[in-house]
Image: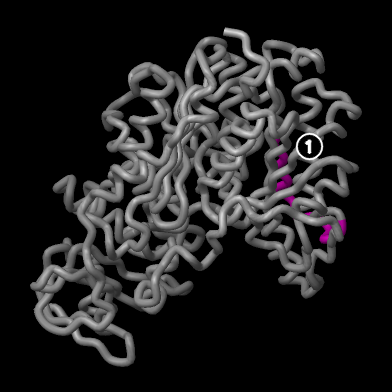
Amino acid sequence: MVSENIPVIIGAGQVTKREASAVTGGSPVDLMAEAVKVAAEDGGLTRECLKKADLLITTSLFSDDGIINPPDCVADKLNLSDARCMVSGFGGIMPHAMLRHAMKAIAEKKADLVILTGAEAQHTMQQAKYSKTFAGWNIASGRLCLAPLSPVGLFDGACETEHVHGLSLPATVYPMFENALRRRYGRTVTDHTQKIGRLMSRLSQVAAKNPHAWFQKPFTPEEIITVSEANRSTAFPYTKRMNAMLLVNQAAALIVTSETRARKMSIDRSKWVYVHGYAEANDHWNVLEREGYGFSPAIEIVGRTALMQAGVTIEDIDFLDLYSCFPVAVQVTRDMLGIAENDNRLLTVTGGLPYFGGPGNNYVMHSMAQMVEVLRQHPEKTGLVTGNSFYMTKHSAAVCSTSPPKDNSAATADISPCQKAVDQKPRHEIDPLPKGRATVETYTVIYDRNNLPGKGVVIGKKDDGKRFAAYTPPDQSLFSAMIKDDFCGIKGTVVSKDKVNIFKPD
């Protein structure tokens, strides 16, 4: 089917600079502008074609110190005088949300040529801070920016009691999900840790072959799970090499237009990649409200919807990139999509956030750019990329191919039924000031930078069914027991004082 306004990705670009740059010239704005130029060159766009972009969206930055109006700063650097500019808002699915916004605008003829980009330069910033030479990026634009695509901010993912007990820190929450997943699988601590090591080692092997990846070497399962000076424990059962690598200098960009405009610009047909199915939805927003842990109704519903929209099944997918900020995210997404643990398909095209790199909100821009490249190399094949925001809270899925879609449903279909379906799932009431008998549902032990266990954190349920978060007493023998054996299901008593809850096991 040929249509004037079917959206198509025509350019994809990535930039990775492993060495710290000078602050001047090495900012996220500089990286984004460079990634856009790479994407334009990739698609064969002339400078005059690129200057006709009428919409530019950037992901929100984690390291925007001293950058005023980032998207317009990028537009200024690229001399895009006609582009309306917008920032995304926070969350790992935002590159997907940006892409759908672009596709919808093109399908409805509200935009003609759209640039999507994002970056982080936290490695450069960290090194400058170490040398005491960082005084902000000092970049500004006076242009008027559109309202953000999403109003969600960096700290909006958790309620007060979750903040108080560390459940606003991904590095604390995801290990708790991992321990709940181990419990669901019925594995011992040792067996499950070995499984994590093998899973993540496969991802690292992909990264080692990817010239855009931050780490250019594979890690063995033993190197991932074994605690060492270079691989300290972070929060049980995770080591540093199981966590997303945030301190990177990375940028990516996509250029999206209509089929008609692509033809007018004489873009090589072999460069065209389409989105055939898209969906997004969030699980119950607060971690303490969730139906349970170690699974995700939203991932299952979003994945099923995107696949159905594309007219394919999960078995038809040739290439996958499952969001991989922590091992549990990969496993839960795999399970919810119906992919068997022994499936021989690789679960990433980039190498995953711990090994490819985790540039703030922008990883999915990279996984989409990488998938574009892979699909061009394998015409008629199909790829699936997933996204994840906050604490396995919000989820997205995009099904892609070089083959044209039958219609514009991926761009224009109403995806709200996904959220309505998730909202019907059971929801727990949160008790911010719990008191009485309770049972641990999941837990972790947080380590300090000297590799010593310092805090125990639990999510529990009172006998009345209400959920709570709490610390354990700071007892080293208790920490040792929590790390050695399964602490899920342990009974005890919870008390609260000044909004801080303490769970004492029997």
Q: Main secondary structure of the magenta part?
A: loop
Q: Amino acid at mark 1?
A: Asp
Q: Is residue 299 above or below residue 190?
A: above
In this view of the protein, which residue sits in the foreground, 457 or 316? 316
Give the side of residue 326 with respect to residue 403, left or right. left
Colouring rule applied to residues: one colour
- Point out residue 363 in the picture as x, y percentages from the top left corner: 57, 44
Q: Quadrant of the N terminus?
A: top right
Q: Position of residue 161 (x, y in %)?
A: 35, 76
What residue span does the magenta drawing correspond to? 13-24
Q: Quadrant of residue 375?
A: top right
Front one among 115 and 222? 115
From the image, tell me which residue sits under label 1. Answer: 54
Residue 323 image-quadrant placement:
top left
x, y percent for residue 378: 55, 13
The quadrant where residue 344 appears: top left
Comparing 322 with 311, the one in front is 311
Q: Nearer the viewer, residue 309 or 322?
A: 309
* Left or right: 492 as drawn, with respect to 359: left
Seen at 62% across and 57% down, the residue is 247
Whether 200 is among the magenta residues is no
Q: Residue at x 27, y 32 (%)?
A: 341
Vertical side of 295 occupied by 322: above or below: above
Quarter of the picture holding the C terminus:
bottom left
Mark 1 residue crowding within 10 angstroms, few (<14) / some (14–19) / many (20+) = some
Q: How many marks?
A: 1
Residue 496 location, x and y as percent?
24, 87
Residue most toward the top?
1
Residue drawn at 38 percent across, 46 percent down: 329
**In terms of secondary structure, where does tag 1 sit?**
loop
> Is 239 located above or below residue 358 in the figure?
below
